[in-house]
Amino acid sequence: METPSLDLSALVRSDLDRLVAVEPGRHGSALLYRRPPAGAVASREVAFTPWLLVSGEALADALPGVVERRVLSGGGVHRVRVHFPDLAAHAEAVAALKTLTGANPSSPQAPYRLFSDITQQILTTLPARLFRNLAFADLRRLQLDIETLTTPGFDFPNAEREGDAIIMIALRDSTGWEHLLSGPAMSEKEMLGEMVRLLRERDPDVLEGHNLFGFDLPYIEARARRHGVRLALGRDGSRLTGRSSRFSAGERTSTYRRYEIHGRHIVDTLHLVQLYDVSHRDMDSYGLKASARYFGVAAPERTYVEGSRISEVYRTDPARLRAYAMDDVRETEALSRILLPSHFYQAQLVPFSLQNCVTRGQATRIDALLCGEYMVANASLPTPQAPRDFQGALTEALRSGVFRNVWHADVRSLYPSIIISRELTPRVDDLGAYLRLLRELRRFRLEAKDAARRAPAEQREHFEALQSSFKVLINSFYGYAGFAQGTFNDYDLAEAVTAAGREILRTMLDFLEAQQATVIEMDTDGIYFVPPAGVDDPAALAARLQAALPAGIDIDLDATYAAMLGYKAKNYALLGHDGTISLTGAALKSRGLEPFQRRYIRELVTLLLQGRGSEAEGLRQRYRQDLEGHVLPLADLAKREVLSTPPRVYAEALSQGGGRRSAAYELALASSREYRQGDTVVFYVTGSKKNVAVTDAAKLLADAAPEVRDENVPYYLDKLESLHAKFAEFFSA
């Protein structure tokens, strides 16, 4: 596959190539894993001593176990780099610094600087970066998916319940090899042992799965512990390890159990699609099947099995379940092939593992890039500027309603363009690394974006994912300036950039309105509008708009739509010329809504965009009749909540006057089944009055009797009417 040209050596120095992983080794060493052009991955040991930075030689003198020190150039606060013989001595020095200074390593103003990621330390000081002179296709990626039983009476499997066993483990890798481990021919223990053997034999660089961190690996870990199976998945024979961590994609932050395998990377494609949607904001679901359909990689003959029916299908039609499991890993591989390359290329620049290039925030990656430049130059590091507030981007919905023939004008990399055209640089960046790196990264992103336009259909998603990831990275150079933990942050720079951005967007607004265009919405770097009457050439209008903007600011009139529903700021729906409808914003697709509400919104919005608003009343009446006639499945009325803490902890907190009542926890405690932390509780509301306390009227979906419909019809009708009323103003349009 063709890739945009980018001379990475001009950006970041790396003295080694074809590295697929690095790990701390024994006393005073690091292990490097290299994939040669032919043959198996080979490892070698090189000298490496863990290090940290301190503010002066007096503090360095007070530390135990120092084997080397280097005074760094420049006027930065952290001007002495001290090395230690091994990780134990390094940890002892960190403990000593906490005592000596009274400051924790996480404090931006501490008189010492700790880089807790040992991989980052190794790659920074070798210096080296992963995957140099490797193509993405050179990586060996292995996909994994498990299927499990669910004890009757529960909605979802739980690895701590004895009967909720793993019944299938589907494996495939990027060479096309596929294998399925399945009961009842194999016991659960035998499947787990054979999975370990096969993974070691296939020797992947990357282990992949969809919701791998949230389901598959925690489940495998718990069941292996039950059977005494050693998960020796590391390239050195070491065990799989896990710890609690946090993952952020845009405004969404979640906790998860992060896993590590020595010499390998672990990538959850659920994280990849969430990061993709930060820029696009039009995915309705992040589940594997929905994501595969969204990216066009779901095979026409793909086998589907409802999660609630897996145990039943395993008993009655195991061949169908085996086909389903293999389709899961095939779709996982296809998603990764589209979305992972952008992070693969970032790992060629940033001194992080591939896993961390997915899970670490953009500002953290930029900080690692900049600090790496300074360490290679043996230059001292400053401390971050104290945080302060400043005015942000321009986001404004000028009009609401349904509009036809909508165009979108987008400033190419608005904030990076402002920084580059005005040569803005952080006050303490003596090496000029910030502006140099941004220029080269922006060039690469624009090349990838242009390649996406030219590429054949089968390559377009690859380039689109690539440019989207780098768009987020380079746009984050502005965000980095206002990042409280950023070593080179600069709030004056951040404020200057947003002020210039608002000015440019206002200039675009003034131009379009002067041309009699109807502007609908402005959001940070783009505008949705209806073109002036008689104007039908986007390129001509784009050229005139471009002429109104300052030098160095380039626009794209990058898309046109058959129709747009402007609901409110950052909440809108678009109808493509091919009939595709995309929803953006929590008000239109919140996962906090019951399934019937989400479906109703999509059907209603579809009518509005298609000019069939007069049919909205008929849609409302149909849903009313379905609710009153008990036609909708109870699952369409149910909410799902995951028990983030054990039910007993909730009960103890409530008894001591802490926390609020929760329907999910109340149901778990009252149930004869043993609910545990991590279980999903699915419930609906019963009764006969619309105004009820959900905690008192909730009922487990698993306890519903098929022959008795006891859902609270007035309660759900009220939800329907409230939704209908929110869109009423658009019906006549």
Image (tube, helix red, strand yellow):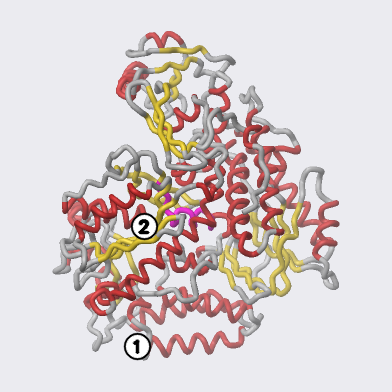
Instruction: Give above or below for 338 relative to 19.
Output: below
Q: Which residue is mark 1?
A: 630
- Residue 483 visible in rendering: no
Image position of 89 with respect to 332: above or below: above
Of 362 and 449, which appears nearest the observer?
A: 449
Name which quarter of the figure residue 378 lies in.
Answer: top right
Left or right of residue 519: residue 60: left
To which quarter of the image does residue 407 belong? bottom right
Asked which secondary structure carries label 2, the reply is strand
Q: Quadrant of residue 671?
A: bottom left
Image x and y of residue 686, in percent = 28, 78
Start-end of magenta stretch: 266-277
Of 322 and 145, the residue lying toward us: 322
Residue 591 place in picture, x, y as percent: 43, 66
Is the Cβ of the residue at disc 2 closer than 8 Å to that at disc 1?
Answer: no
Magenta part mainly helix, strand or loop?
Answer: helix
Q: Which amino acid, mark 1?
A: His
User: Going 61% across and 79% down the picture, which residue do you hit?
Assistant: 608
The magenta stretch spans residue 396: no
Q: How would you rate the neighbour count of disc 1 (Cα within 10 Å): few for under 14, some for 14-19, many for 20 or more?
A: some
Identify the residue at image location x=41%, y=68%.
Answer: 327
Type of amino acid at the residue the image marks with label 2? Leu
Element at label 1 = loop
Q: Quadrant of the C terminus?
A: bottom right
The residue singled out by tag 2 in the image is 144
- The number of callouts visible is 2
Nearest the viewer among 477 and 199 is: 199
Q: On residue 84, which mark appears?
A: none
Residue 619 image point, x, y percent: 51, 86
Q: Is residue 193 above or below residue 46?
A: below
- The verdict on residue 267 being magenta is yes
